[in-house]
Image (cartoon, rainbow, N blue to C red):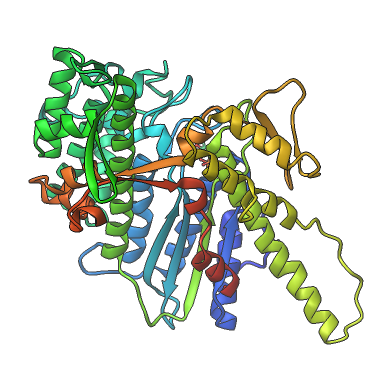
Amino acid sequence: MYKGAEFGELSPHPFAMADRAYRLMMNYGTSQAILVSGESGAGKTESTKMLMQYLAFMGGKVESDGRSVQQQVLESNPVLEAFGNAKTVRNNNSSRFGKFVELQFDQNGKISGAAIRTYLLERSRVCQISDPERNYHCFYMLCAAPPEDRERYKLGDASLFHYLNQSNCIKLDGMDDSSEYIATRRAMDIVGISSDEQDAIFRVVAAILHLGNVEFSEGSEADSSVPKDDKSQFHLRTAAELFMCDEKSLEESLCKRVMVTRGESIVRNLDSRAAALSRDALARMVYSRLFDWLVNKINTTIGQDPTSKLLIGVLDIYGFESFKTNSFEQFCINLTNEKLQQHFNQHVFKMEQEEYTKEEIDWSYIQFVDNQEILDLIEKKPGGIIALLDETCMLRNSNHETFAEKLYQKFKDNPHFSRPKFSRSDFTIHHYAGNVTYQTDLFLDKNIDYAVNEHQDLLHASTSPFVSSLFPPSEESTKSNKSTKFTSIGSSFKLNRTTLHALHKA
Ligand SMILES: Nc1ncnc2c1ncn2[C@@H]1O[C@H](COP(=O)(O)OP(=O)(O)OP(=O)(O)O)[C@@H](O)[C@H]1O
């Protein structure tokens, strides 16, 4: 019905938008971009799927081997959703990453390639969930897999695993994890992930679950730790088997840390709390590498068309979030939305109006809210909230309260910042879309992203080529020493220039 229909003639529908983008691209030879926005649960991902479906219908080609580009693009959705979506308070299938899909077309309007870029997977979810949310779908699917698969990965009921049972929500109404497992496997076949690779992927997923069940108790030396009991020892052994790495080395990488001072390596014991943090850091790192691997693999098998001059990009980014409690994830997500809003302002209002002025066109100035000051408040270097957060993370004896104190002092006169009454550590940002109060208690832990090279080298030495490929040798180990490096999630996260450029170009 929507094919070729005048825009606005039929009821509003993603098909109408997709048809318009396709027609404009074909008729004027210009690339297009569709930005799907809205708050969490509004229907962005479902709308994006419909847009893709329509574009695949218009630009689809019949391939002799049955695996067309458009089919692979469509089937990449269930794969990415299995590993990047989870139940949140707002949405049973909430995307916990941003996605920019670029469809490439040839001169005849047929899809000739595609590229998928993803942003900021919420990795804290791998180790930490709160009621009534869930972890990523793939963990529950694997625990509900056919018995022979569960046996192979030494898995049992999802409720047995610490990374899943921190929340009471294990099963979802209307979602059958065992049939989702089969569907995900089938989608993996279509996007070109071989059965050996699928096996390696699920081994890693299972290893993460076992890792999460390793608990620590005080060791014999001061401030040292050891696996707590036989149960923890079993899970440690199983995780090592699944990662195909040495069990003793895995234990050491969790219970010790190598520090480098003046070129000298010092091995330091970790107490049980620090060992548990190290375990979680490893689980998060493995999971995010696995997710990146999946995206790369999908891109490689779908293939790019470097000669394509016609593109349609669809950006499905997590919308503005304002919950009862808002932590570092909401802060990053809302920063993304501020940046998109600024991009929109920049190109739709600022540049357009400058052009009118230059050409001396008579027009009335359009008022718009410029959110540059909010962006400065958050990300200005030095002095913005992220810079202050990084600074606090580097200092010894600092905590979320000292961080909050810094913010209160620095931004007491900033109109976009306020301190809620009676609060010792919360802060409110007056975003373009509304006020959001953030709880800082986990900001420091979540921002610190220790690139622990012991873990890196341990997994690089895995006899599984798949696991080894996820962990190229660390820079430090190639220089024959090891260290623990601090990186900041906040600083490293930006809706990158390439995407903004692609959006603008389109
Ligand atoms: N067009 C639709 N028809 C029927 N149900 C829909 C439609 N769009 C959304 N829904 C329902 O709303 C739920 C949330 O939609 P969706 O996952 O697309 O939201 P979202 O905006 O992408 O959220 P998030 O930002 O949390 O990822 C879906 O799981 C589905 O149940």
Which quarter of the rendering shows the N terminus?
bottom right
Please identify the quarter of the rendering in which residue 60 is found: bottom left
Please identify the quarter of the rendering in which residue 366 is found: bottom right
Q: Nearer the viewer, residue 457 or 192?
A: 457
Please identify the quarter of the rendering in which residue 434 is found: top right
Q: Measuring 55% from the left and 47% from the top, which residue is drawn there?
A: 44
Residue 443 position within the rendered picture, expressed as x and y whole percent measured from the top left: 53, 34
Evaluate whether residue 144 shows in this view.
no
Q: Measuring 68% from the left and 33% from the top, which residue is drawn there?
A: 427
Which residue of the protein is positioned furthest toward the top in this rendering? 229
* Left or right of residue 283, residue 365 in this image: right
Up/down of 329 relative to 195, above or below: above
Residue 431 position within the rendered picture, expressed as x and y whole percent measured from the top left: 72, 44
Q: Measuring 24% from the left and 21% from the top, which residue is drawn there?
A: 224
Which quarter of the rendering shows the C terminus?
bottom right
Residue 261 position within the rendered picture, expressed as x and y whole percent measured from the top left: 29, 45
Residue 77 position within the rendered picture, expressed as x and y whole percent measured from the top left: 38, 49
Which residue of the protein is positioned furthest toward the front in this rendering? 262
Evaluate whether residue 66 shows in this view.
yes
Q: Measuring 53% from the left and 57% from the top, which residue is drawn there?
A: 495
Q: Nearer the viewer, residue 61 or 322?
A: 322
**Total label count?**
0
Up/down of 139 relative to 76, above or below: above
* Left or right of residue 298, residue 427 in this image: right
